[in-house]
Image (cartoon, rainbow, N blue to C red):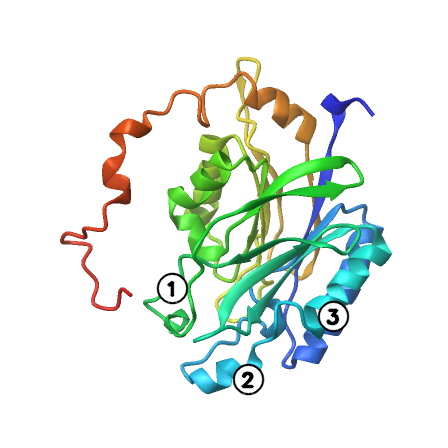
Amino acid sequence: MNPQDVKITVALLQLRPCTKQEENLKKGLEACKRAKASGADIALFPEMWSNGYALTWDREQNRRAAVPADGEFTGAFSALAKELDMAIAVTFLERFSPLPRNSVRLFDRTGRPVLHYAKVHTCDFDVERNLTRGEAFSTAELNTAKGPVKVGAMICYDREFPESARILMLKGAELILVPNACPMEINRLSQLRARAYENMTAIATANYAAGTPDCNGHSSAFDGIAYRGDCPRDTLVAEAGEEEGIYPAVIPLGELRRYRESECQGNAYRRPELYGELISEKILPPFVRGDRR
């Protein structure tokens, strides 16, 4: 295959969770098999699939619901990734000290874990205050049947901070995977479109289907290619409705790579020597919040 024609397919697993972890495991494995049958190279789950984002204010209850990063729950997806010859990004409430973490683990098509990410921007104005925050953004080279692709991840609220996607772009990400659990309305979809545009990076988001509390589907993917020649175009390549289903998103990776070599977004013309305020820890009114950690 001509490298310029390479396309990869991300299956957005827009599901409704079950009430028990073992049920989510079974349903998740079946969804991955359906994703493979649809031609997917990568299967992406919504946020915290192991328990359907069923967090509580009871810290002990959350600890009991958490699973280890290399335990039976994630191990089942590792084995299936190898069996299907397909990458799987599975999400879970991770057993961690002193409090659990909101995590995603990406297995390549041999079942090898290549990326582990814990949500950095936890929603501390809500129940996620009872989680340990992640401490870094990272990328990995993912081995796919279409060749290697540099992948990063951010989770739900992370997308509301331009710095999340920016750091991943600076670390080489061509594709950012975004597990999600919230209403995806026009403003949040616009955030993802902006992150893709300004970083010339593909972004794929999997959300829970309507019928899940505080969720409405609308999983999406943007390819980050804002222009073909002098012609502007919508970077949106897939948007689901509200219903449960497996939604394939085709990312024209070869075209994206050519686009990144010549266009003016991304890192070509930045002035980082002037951005000192971006890493200042000072918070001034009206943005002072008493529940900030």
Residue 123: mark in rendering: 1
Q: Distance between the residues labelled 2 and 3?
A: 21 Å
Residue in the image at 86% along x and 58% along y: 83
Look at mark 3 in the image and give the residue it sits on.
Answer: 27
Q: What residue type is labelled 1?
A: Cys
Residue 113 image offset from top left, x and y in percent: 68, 56
Q: Residue 212, position in %: x, y?
A: 56, 70
Name the side, left or right, on which 181 lies relative to 110: left
| 10 Å crowding of disc 1: few (<14), some (14-19), many (20+) | some
Q: In this view, does 16 lie to the left or right of 53?
A: right
- Judge by depth and name the residue closer to the eye, 88 or 229: 88
| Camera-side residue of 37 and 258 | 258
User: Amino acid type of disc 2?
Assistant: Arg
Mark 2, residue position: 64
Q: Earlier in the sequence, mark 2 or mark 3?
A: 3
Badge 3 marks a residue whose secondary structure is: helix
Mark 2: few, some, or many residues within 10 Å (few <14, many ≥20)? few
Distance Cα–Cα, label 2 vs label 1: 21 Å
Instruction: Give the distance between the C-alpha atoms of the residues marked 3 and 1, in whole angstroms.
Output: 27 Å
Residue at (45%, 60%) from the top-left corner? 134
Which type of secondary structure does the marked residue at label 1 adopt?
Answer: loop
